[in-house]
Image (spheres, grey):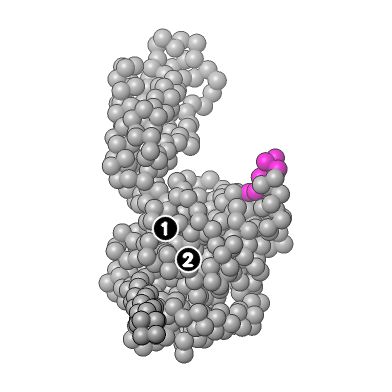
Amino acid sequence: MRQQRRVSNQGRNKRVLLMAAALTLLTVSALPGEDRSSSATTKRVAAVKERLAADYERMETLYKHLHSNPELSLHEAATSARLAQELKAIGFDVTQRVGGYGLVGVLKNGDGPTVMVRTDMDALPVIERTGLPYASKVRKRDKNENEVGVMHACGHDMHMTVWTGTARVLASMKDRWKGTLLFIAQPAEEIGAGARMMLEAGLFKKFPRPDYAFALHCAANLPHGSVAYTEGLAMANVDSVDIIVHGKGGHGAAPHTTIDPVVLAARIVLDLQTLVSREINPIDPAVVTVGSIHGGSKHNIIPNDVHMQLTVRSTKDSVRKHLLDGIRRIAEAAAKGAGAPLPEVKVNPAEFTPALHNDPALTSKTVAVFKEVLGPDKVVSRPPMMGGEDFSRYGRARVPICLFWLGTIDPKRVAEAEKDPARPLPSLHSDLFAPVPEPTIKTGVLAMSVAVLHVLGK
């Protein structure tokens, strides 16, 4: 009997020790200010949904207004003013013109972490063809004085709506969190300049420096009601390169008297393909794409110059350097081989977007909450992609960041597209891209609100 009691006591002691160890692990892995209580999450979700239901009509009205009134990069004056109006009405201390039309809103609520939530504001030079009653009909002149359409074809109107809705929800729940909210509306994301502009204007010096930063982005192939995430490397370095190929113009019937820059440009295009296929380690992702090539004015005239525009993608800084150096080397070698003047190769540093690395710890914790709130089947892992997103610059400023993807498409349409390749979904930047408003807005506000509450909640 005594031996059985000793065994029983030893078993109980082991169980106690195991429980204590488990609690210690939970404490160690928790983020500062984080509340891991399931009951706390349930109460927060109920409170967020209650406010969402009461405020949805306002959010949809704002979404349609923003969609109908898009503005190009560096011209977000009216958009920024409208968002400033929204934040002021909510109770934020608002500062405008922080790096172009950048906007910063601060809401303090006692001692605790500072959490930044970012939205972007700019639209694209695209003529909308969705046929929606609130479709954009805006036409503007671009920097080259060409008339272009203007459309939120990348979902920034949805980003702004979710951002504003989240600000309103969190401001109404101040009894459930402690800390500081830093809500920023960023210009010029589409040209990779806005985050740099805001940081150079003193974003993290003039305003509270965030302990965590969140952003979301619309996904054009994900059903509404769901979100996607990537831990660690999520998006690529992006560079814009211009090459002006110089030749010697003349009559098309006498090519021997010329140095044809069209032929030189064609040679350069082909030779550039070997940069990735023969000079970069196959396990390192890289892309060199010639997206634009212009030269000449008439059938029988060999021009003096050809202008090429390239986008260059990489995930490592060393690979980025090799690609950019290689582009110059290949272009100059082609010119020397033809006896032509050296080409002009220009890399635009103002439009460089660094690779985006989601903080693994913050992302892991946030994903766990998403699975609890939305359901495990609504939270999917997404592999890294070669697109660019200058939200990455805040991470490079040593702030833990987490950008996640928001589903926007009717699940039936997603299923149809998966079954029938002949019926693909419109991609981001397409003139047909159109999120389904209500479920997208509600999921976005719910997800972003619980992400912030998870690190600020009492």
The image shows residue 203, relative to residue 258, as above or below, that is below
**Residue 346 falls in which quadrant of the image?**
top left
Name the element at disc 2.
helix
Question: Position of 412 compared to 250: left or right?
Answer: right
Would residue 393 be found to the left or right of residue 122 on screen?
A: left
Q: Depth check: give the residue in front, 140 or 338.
A: 338
The residues tagged by marks 1 and 2 sit, at their Cα atoms, a distance apart of 10 Å
Instruction: Give the main secondary structure, helix, strand or loop, of the magenta stretch.
Output: loop
Instruction: Give the magenta range.
Output: 420-426
Q: Amino acid at mark 1?
A: Glu
> Which of the image's four quarters has the C terminus?
bottom left
**Residue of label 1:** 231
Query: Which residue corresponds to the image point at 43% horizontal and 24% vertical from the top-left?
Result: 270
Residue contact at pointers 1 and 2, CB within 8 angstroms: yes
Is 424 included in the stretch rendered in magenta? yes
Task: Give the residue at x 42% y 38%.
Answer: 287
Please say whether residue 58 is visible from this viewpoint.
no
Tag 2 residue: 367
Give me the residue at 34% from left, 61% from top: 395
Which one is nearer the viewer's eye here, 165 or 418?
A: 418
* Residue 428 locus on image (x, y percent): 57, 51
* Viewer-nearest residue: 171 or 66: 171
Q: Is residue 259 above or below residue 350?
A: above
Compared to residue 416, the image places residue 64 above or below, namely: below
Q: Position of residue 436 (x, y in %)?
A: 66, 62
x and y percentages locating residue 222 in the rendered image: 60, 56
**Residue 127: where, in percent of width, then height?**
62, 50
Amino acid marked by disc 2: Val
Q: Earlier in the sequence, mark 1 or mark 2?
A: 1
Q: Is residue 405 left or right of residue 199?
A: right
Q: Is residue 256 visible?
A: yes
Q: Residue at x 49, y 71 (%)?
A: 369
